[in-house]
Each structure stands twice: as structure tokens, then as C-alpha cells.
Image (spheres, rainbow, N blue to C red):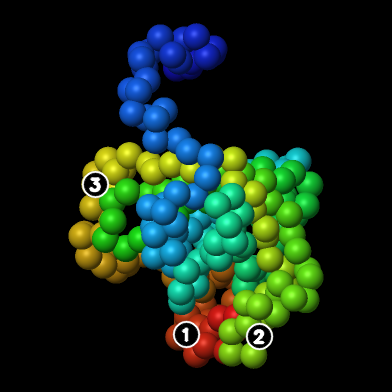
Amino acid sequence: MTYIESVEELEALYGEINPNSKAKIVRQITPLYRKWIEASRFLILSTVGPEGTDASPRGDDGPVVRIVDETTVMLPDWRGNNLTDSLHNIVRDERVSLMFMVPGANNVVRLNGRAKLSIDPDITNSFEQDGKHPKSVAVITLEAIYFQCAKALMRSKLWTSGDESTGLPTAGQFVKEVKADFDAEAYDSGYAEYAKGRMW
């Protein structure tokens, strides 16, 4: 198998960068990027740490982040599985990337920056949902923001292909594959009810 071994090889293979690809990168949240981010209820948070990389889905029932100003957003950490891989990484390496998605839109907005975890009660309490608060909030300082080419979502027909999940493994089955005595059916059938009181 032949691999690319240098940046020079890579650049020779792909050729010149479209000038518009560089022009779209900005260093602050413009009015149009604000509009997009405020419409996004879902993002992928990417982090890096000593053990490697991590990508984590984050979602909310309204805007997934709060825009503080032109270069700052806040991302609350709602209840999950307590593995806290992303949070471990942020504490040790502030570099983060956020990929904002909006159902039906083929463009994706990417934000690169640096994050710190705040446990300031004034901040965590300001995200109250159903009387609950996040244990921490990532305060992210923007370094670059830009939209991503739509071709990936167009090729995958992500928003138009319908439900293709029939026959796929369930969460319970994933666990049972490595823990033979796990009751996958009970877990899967009861998860929606279990999750109701644990969204926040």
C-alpha cells in the first residue's frame, strides 16, 4: 500500500486551494454565523488529549451553545455516561473544534478555538433546565469559524434518505456483545422512559 509521507506530496496531489475556501474563514462570529449557531441544536465536539482524540455528540432542545460575544460561546455539559473523555481532554489540552449541524441544511459550520471548564455557580445556574444544572460549562474562545462544503451531506443524503436504522445493533446489543449476561432487551425497551428524567 502506498502512503503520503510528506506535506509536499499531499499538496502536489491536491493542487491549488480555491481562494474562496480561505476567504470564508473569519475570526469572529458574524451576524450570519450567529444566525446559524442559534438555529443549531446539535454539534460534534472534538478534543485532543495525551491518549488521543475524542469526538462527542452534544444536543439541546434549543440552541446547543450560548453566544456570549463575537469570540466566545458557552457549551453546558448535560448528563451523559460520566466517562467525561472530552472534559478530561479539555482540562489537559484546551484545543477544541465544534461542528454545528441543522436538520435539512447541507452546510455545516465549524468553529475552532480553546476551551476552559467553568464551575462558577452563576454560569452553571444560568443554564437551568427542569430545576437541574450542568456540573460544568465549557467556555470556548473562538480562533476561526467557517462553513464546510456541502458535498459530504449531499453525497450521504443525510436529511433525505429516511430512517435506515432497521436491523442495526441497539445500544443494549452493543453492551451484551462484551458482557454476555447483560439484559439487552430490557435495557432497550426501557431506555426511553429511563432517559426522560435524565436529560438535564
Viewer-nearest of discs 2 and 1: 2
Residue occupied by mark 2? 132
SS for callout 1: helix
The label nearer to you, 1 versus 3, is 3
Q: Nearer the viewer, residue 96 or 113?
A: 113
Q: Measure the C-alpha gap from mark 2 to mark 1.
A: 19 Å
Q: Earlier in the sequence, mark 2 or mark 1?
A: 2
- Rounded to the nearest whole Å, what is the CA distance between mark 3 and mark 2? 38 Å
Left/right of residue 157 with respect to residue 21 in the rendered view: left
Crowding near the residue tagged with mark 3, few <14, some 14–19, many ≥20 C-alpha atoms within 10 Å = some
Vertically, is 124 above or below 190? above
Q: Residue at x 74, y 44 (%)?
A: 93
> Which of the two discs, 1 and 3, labels the residue nearer the N terminus?
3
Q: Secondary structure at mark 2?
A: loop
The crowding category of the residue bearing disc 1, from other C-alpha atoms within 10 Å (few below 14, some 14 to 19, many at least 20), is: few
Asked if 23 appears above or below 5 in the picture, the reply is: below
The residue wearing badge 3 is 154
Q: Position of residue 143 (x, y in %)?
A: 59, 40
> What is the x, y in percent for residue 33?
42, 52
Is residue 130 found left or right of 44 in the rendered image?
right
Q: Is residue 186 left or right of residue 160?
A: right
| Residue marked by disc 1 | 192
- Mark 2: give few (<14), some (14-19) or many (20+) Cα within 10 Å: some
What residue lies at 60% left-to-right and 80% top-to-bottom?
200
Between residues 171 and 161, which one lies in front from this camera angle? Answer: 161
Q: State how far apart marks 1 and 3 are (Cα).
A: 31 Å
Residue drawn at 47 percent across, 69 percent down: 63
Single out the mark in the foreground, 3 or 2: 2
Amino acid of disc 1: Ala
